[in-house]
Image (tube, rainbow, N blue to C red):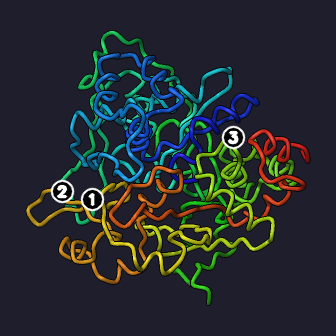
Amino acid sequence: MGVAVSSWRLARAVSARGHLGVVSGTALDVVLARRLQLGDPDGEVRRALRAFPDPALAAEVLNRYFVAGGKQADAPFTGVPMFTAAPSRRLEALATVAGFVEVFLAKEGHSGRVGINFLQKVPLPTPAILYGALLAGVVYVLVGAGIPREIPAVLDALVRHARVEVPLYVAGALPEDGFTLTFEPSRLLDTTLLPPLPRPRFLAIVSSATLAASLVRHGGRVDGFVVEHHVAGGHNAPPRGRMVLAESGEPIYGARDVVDPERMREIGLPFWLAGGSGGPGGLAEAKRAGAAGIQVGTLFAFCDESGIDPSLRASVLSQVRSAAVHVVTDPLASPTGFPFKVVQVDGTLSESAVYDTRERRCDLGYLRETYRRSDGTLGYRCPGEPVADYVRKGGTIEETHGRKCVCNGLLSTVSLGQVRSGGVEPAIVTAGAGLIEIAGLLRGRETYSAGDVIDYVTAAH
């Protein structure tokens, strides 16, 4: 669902109804910094900051980014440094506090369960944001878009406030390099004053039963799986085997890309089906197949409580009502190399004219690739950055073709876009292939709530 679409408001609404509400952990450091610069008009963020276990650390973040009354609409946001394998203490503090704030607010006012979702393709900020989420009492951690083999060990360490050190994938690394990613909670606050934290359940998001079985055997404690079908929104796993494109330019998926529920049942852990299961009868069908339930994303993404900019939401819902909505699985859009589902919306990066006129830049860097320079040090590159910069860092021109700045685009989707000399960064909207299913929620009304989604999904069960 992108960055801050499943924000604390949406997760709270779902959890309060007795289901698992999940906040997005992606880019929460920048999300928090920009919310504070907008003045935190309802005071929610500042209230959460007052609950942080270390008031001095929370005050440090508040004093650095809060703008009373909000910044001027035409003023750019103050930048947040990009994460590297050796981030500053200041950046780790922002990320940790951000993880806490999002989960704290999602948990308020009810006794339901709250989880947090991360992308394995965005490893550098994860330990710090995850630690903040743990301090706030998150009870589920979901990780996909990659092979989250190290997450159980990270959880085992962080609930003890211990140092995290995990292998870091580096393109071009030599066998003897041994690059690692480290995070030390005691660098930020006095962990001797804190009791051990409850360990949340870990759900790996997979698109292969083979991967699920491998994680159980070799990946530490796994508590279950979200089995994602390729019709789901956001990043999709590439088709198995050689990538073949249809005339439309979209990847062609086949029978090998559909996980057999029987193979998941054999693993012996609970699993939830994601992607294409949110329609009438989807929940009942999933349970008949042996699943514990379903994960619903797209239907919630355009409800009243989601973080999507109201004007973008209204545009998409208008297209749904007129049956003119179109979702494209773009094999090139994401710098990660994973196919990415993009809703075709006027004025966004889905339009060639908008994409072609945007000046390339990489100032957020979440989807950058870490690579080994010739001198053995680490470098960072993104095929969405200026072409000359990417080629200078060892990339090829071919890899830059069609790449979009998903980082900046997704922040604009949730009204947190950076202001440039030419205006606000263009948005990019993602949703599952079954976006038209929202029509079932719009009969006789212009909008709908998270509660309406829950009623709709569970009614046919």
**What secondary structure is marked by label 2?**
strand
Q: Separation of disc 3 and disc 1 at Cα?
A: 34 Å
Check contact, mark 3 vs mark 1: CB within 8 A: no
The mark that comes first in sequence, 1 or 2, is 1
Q: Which residue is mark 1?
A: 370
Depth-wise, is mark 3 or mark 1 nearer the camera?
Answer: 1
Q: Is residue 286 above or below residue 52?
A: below
**What secondary structure is marked by label 3?**
loop
The mark that comes first in sequence, 3 or 1, is 3
Check contact, mark 1 vs mark 2: CB within 8 A: yes
- Give amino acid for label 2: Leu
Q: Position of residue 424 (x, y in %)?
A: 42, 60
Q: Quadrant of residue 15?
A: top right
Q: Residue at x 39, y 81 (%)?
A: 401
Q: In the image, which disc is placed on residue 284?
A: none
Would residue 91 appear left or right of 37 to someone viewing this image? Answer: left
**What secondary structure is marked by label 1?**
strand
Considering every residue shown, the one lying at the far left of the view is 375
Would residue 417 appear left or right of 22 to someone viewing this image? Answer: left
Depth-wise, is mark 3 or mark 2 nearer the camera?
Answer: 2
Would residue 191 appear left or right of 346 to someone viewing this image? Answer: left
The mark that comes first in sequence, 3 or 2, is 3
Q: Which residue is mark 2?
A: 378
Q: Separation of disc 3 and disc 2 at Cα?
A: 39 Å
The foreground one among 51 and 185 is 51
Q: Which residue is mark 3?
A: 270
Q: Is residue 335 visible?
A: yes
The foreground one among 346 and 114 is 346
